[in-house]
Amino acid sequence: RRGGQRWWRPAAMASEASDPSASSASAAPGDGGDGDEETAPGLPGEDERDEDLENRVAWTVNAPLLYDLFIGCSLEWPALSVAWLPDDPEEGARLAFGLHTDGSVPHEVVVAELCCSAVSELDADPWQTWQVPGLGSVEAFGCSAPPGAEGPLRVAARLAHPTEVNRIAPCPSVPKLLATKAASGAVLLFDYKAERTPGVVSPDATLMPKGEASDGFALEWSPSNRRLLATGDNSGRLCVWDVEVAAKVSANPLLQVSQAHDGAVCATCFNGQEPHSVATVGDDGCLRLWDLRAAGGVGAAAVPRLKATVSGDEVLSVDWSRHQEHLIATTGKDREVRVWDVRAMRQAPLHALCGHKGDVVAVRWAPFREGLLASCSSDARLLLWDLEIESPPSDEALEGTSPEMLFAHAGHHQGVSDFAWSSLDEYLMCSVSEDNRLQIWQPSAELYLPGAGEEEEGEEGD
């Protein structure tokens, strides 16, 4: 166990653990009752439901061997996006996610804070359960809540949102500033610590590009220029905004390209080492790189400095390596994660990572280590990839899976919509899925610290 991380709050051991299999085996929200009911067209049959139940129980039993930490929240509504907030020395680790309701209650952005401490050793029955106001049922192991706390995390803020929250992006340099992408095409900016009337949509600024409004998901801050925010929508439009955070939040369009792609702009990202470089991917299967210095501003006929076809299908996500500025990762409906050298786009990708069995909706590089990235998919899996892994013997390789796969998170039961790496503690992750689940987890240290288990046994023997 790595000690001293500030996101763990000092706490006493929580109450006696409850039965993990009971919570795992219980029907998920929206599941039917007994197995005698007729199966509606398109729904899983009894055999498939039994197999799913067996998988859930098996995962619950094995999870304490695979993870140092796991916290699972059963939300009332699904979340399409999740992100860790930048570190604030005065607070515990915080994350934000957006709830997609059915319209009977307001859509919301929720900010939650971890308020728990690490458990150095797991009991034979390590699972604990809580009922946390605003977050629902919580089950966890590897942590304990402070005395008097209602669980290992709490709601720090709730912000009413006009539509479902397609994407949420915390500002890297201003921890309290959140940007969200609404289904209306607008980008909303919130100071989540400001006083607001509950249930009333009141953003601090609303950014709307020129032209007809269009839904979309692309939204990303520049990691090196605190003022730049890039957005894209389903009409193919790309916008880069210059956001000023002062007494009042305001923004001006720095660049607007009306047709950056033939079809939707699905994702965008900045080069962390070259703040003027922006990458976009879209429904047309293309990757395009834009230079803000040569773009010409709003209304100009901007031309990408690089255009390359990276897939024969829709490309849903892109991310620039934080450690090697020439490496970029793309993924989408072809189910492969590809790593490219932008200096040699006419050549084959450096890595073509296989292992997902559904659309891969997001890919992101780890902030703390070179050559490490993760991806999530509609197949309910979140995979970690280590590009430095040596190929295993052929008899040990998993069929249909690239040898670079380091870890498979299988805690979700339906498609994983989004995930994020924490910048506070290595391998600390959060993820959300279509089955209304928010999960915070960290693989066992033995995964990435070879000999960790042997060292602990040696210390006990001494």
Image (cartoon, helix red, strand yellow):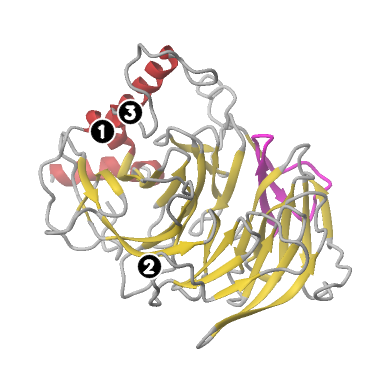
Residue at 29% from the left image edge and 27% from the top image edge: 25
Image x and y of residue 228, in percent: 64, 73
Camera-near label (1 vs 2) is: 2
Q: Amino acid at mark 2?
A: Pro
Spatial distance from mark 3 to mark 1, Cα to Cα?
9 Å
Residue at mark 2:
198
> The residue under label 3 is which amino acid type?
Ala
Marks 3 and 1 close (CB-CB < 8 Å): no
Q: Is residue 222 above or below residue 394?
A: below
Name the front one of labels 3 and 1: 3
The secondary structure type at the circle numbered 2 is loop
Q: Nearer the viewer, residue 162 or 236?
A: 162
Q: Is residue 401 above or below residue 319?
A: above
Q: Magenta segment, which residues?
A: 325-351
What's the amino acid at mark 1? Ser
Q: Residues within 10 Å of mark 1 (few under 14, many from 20)?
A: some
Q: Which mark is residue 27?
A: 3
